[in-house]
Amino acid sequence: MSSTSDPTPTYDVVVIGAGFAGIYLVHKLRDELGLDVKVFERGAGIGGTWYWNRYPGARCDLESDAYSLSFNDEIEQEWDWTERYASQPEILRYINFVADKLDVRGNIELNSTVTRAVFDEDTDTWTVSCDTGASAKARYLMTATGILSVPSMPTFEGMETFEGRIYHTGDWPHEGVDFAGKRVAVIGTGSSGIQSIPVIAEQAAQLTVFQRTATFTVPAANRPVTENERNATKRSYKQLREQMRRSQVGVLLDAGIGNFADVDLRVARGELERRWRGAGMSTAMVLSDNLRSIEANEFTSQFVRDKIHEIVDDPAVARMLEPHDYPIGTKRLPIDTNYYDTFNREHVRLVSIRDTPITRFSPAGIVVGDTEYEFDAIVLATGFDASTGALDRIHIEGIDGRIMREQWRDGAESYLGLASPGFPNLFTVTGPGSPAILTNVIGSIEHHVEWIAEYIAYLRAEGITRTEATTEATEAWTAHVAELASMTLYPRAASWYMGANIPGKPRVFLAYIGGLHNYRDRCERIAADGYLGFAHADRARIPAGSAAAAAGS
């Protein structure tokens, strides 16, 4: 409760965001630690990324039984996935099912965008403010804002003059969009473009795709899950989950067959053919050194280019669809359903804007060079301001007036992707510098939430009211993340992993590449060593226990 002099509600923890991470934080901190938890969510419903991303064809690129929470046996056994790769509506239903099972809705305030969070050094508490006028105080602040939650909006000249409708895949109308009989443009051929283009093509009278950079993609081979498969998975969940936690990316994928220099390339080609028919992301992992050897990578890349020419009838269009700008796998590898085949449809055309960019929008459509294309609707599949985008939009003020977005002006620096110096008692779930964006993000979320909960239990037991990542530990971790990335082909791609899709964003590799299993081991060692790399202050100055005490009231 609040003091009589300050009516601001107080809690033990304030969480920003009600996706998978926010929901699990409520359960873990409230039900297992007995803390008073408040969640602010900008959407009108829960679900995070899956609440907003409702564009045609939106679905997960990891298999459904892996892209799900593992901490609750009852949820695992009661929920039935219907497809190998779940669609957005099914994932959103699953998230709501989980929220109801855990009874977390009472802790969540919807339609509330956090605009400001300020740390009070006298009381070791955060004050959080929302655009609605709502505010709250808490000892701990947790950001569960997601990796891909802020759409990247392009600014073309004349956008406001276009007389049709403009949509962004990351902010799709919840009532859906009917493209029947319409002339439609899609700008962008990243993951959301690759998923939406085939579905829009089925509806539209005419579809024009504007492509700047050709993208590697492999077939999803999506299909319904059989009852036998579902039952077998439920019987094996315990073993499967443990194997996932001990894996490189948090999901079980087909392993590589050896390095490029050591394998029979005829065997490698045969294995590529097999995986192309249904192994998804594993297709790009046939050669074990695919992300370290440019020769290995080019072998895999050329295989996909050859497939494009097998699929696409028009050789000129096939050549335009050939990716040459980056090594395969150094950008997120989408999995698709009939993407390349879509360009065989008579009403679908591909326009390259690589050498002749979009000049402007016009009232009738889009102008490229001297050519005007007329449309009824334009879809912006232009991606997201990844990892740091949501945090940059909040005024987060730590000690000595430090502002997080200013401190990160030259690139995000964090310790373990969890904390940053100058911002005490603030934890960034799946933040920059964690392995999350290169893994099954659900596994990374679960690990972070569980590690944070154990740390808070430790702090409270020790009577510690303030913890902060040290500058030395943060600099060492950031350098380690960069060093690992430099040993791979990842930096050769102008990807959102590097912030390259956002004009003016510093080029810093945003993920720990050492694998989820190694990251988990390191975090366990840090905890066992008394949370090495964190500075603890103000032992027992304020008694632990009540939300009021935690807020300094």
Image (cartoon, helix red, strand yellow):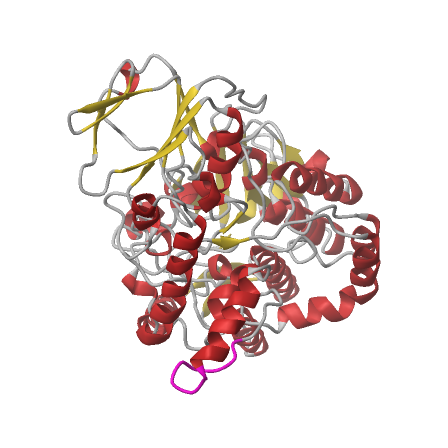
Q: Mostly what secondary structure, the magenta segment?
A: loop
Q: How many marks?
A: 0
Q: Residue at x 50, y 41 (%)?
A: 195
Q: Residue at x 29, y 50 (%)?
A: 500
Can you tell which quarter of the image residue 455 is in? bottom right
| Residue found at the far left of this picture | 370
For the C terminus, the image quarter is top right
Residue 63 place in picture, x, y as percent: 64, 55
Instruction: Decide: is 367 above or below 325.
Output: above
For the N terminus, the image quarter is top right
Q: Residue at x 55, y 33 (%)?
A: 54
Q: Is residue 44 left or right of residue 397?
A: right
Tell me if residue 258 is in the magenta stretch. Answer: yes
Depth check: 234 or 217 in front? 217
Residue 485 place in picture, x, y as percent: 35, 69
> Does residue 114 appear in this view?
no
Q: Residue at x 25, y 43 (%)?
A: 503
Residue 283 place in picture, x, y as percent: 51, 65
Can you tell which quarter of the image residue 412 is in? bottom left
> Does residue 379 appear in this view?
yes
Residue 137 place in picture, x, y as percent: 55, 39
Q: Is residue 349 left or right of residue 253?
A: left
Instruction: Decide: is 130 above or below 404.
Output: above
Instruction: Decide: is 13 above or below 346.
Output: below
Depth check: 418 or 196 in front? 196
The magenta-colored residue range is 256-264
Depth check: 147 or 450 in front? 147
Tell me if residue 500 is in the magenta stretch. Answer: no
Instruction: Decide: is 434 above or below 248.
Output: above
| Residue found at the far bottom of this picture | 262
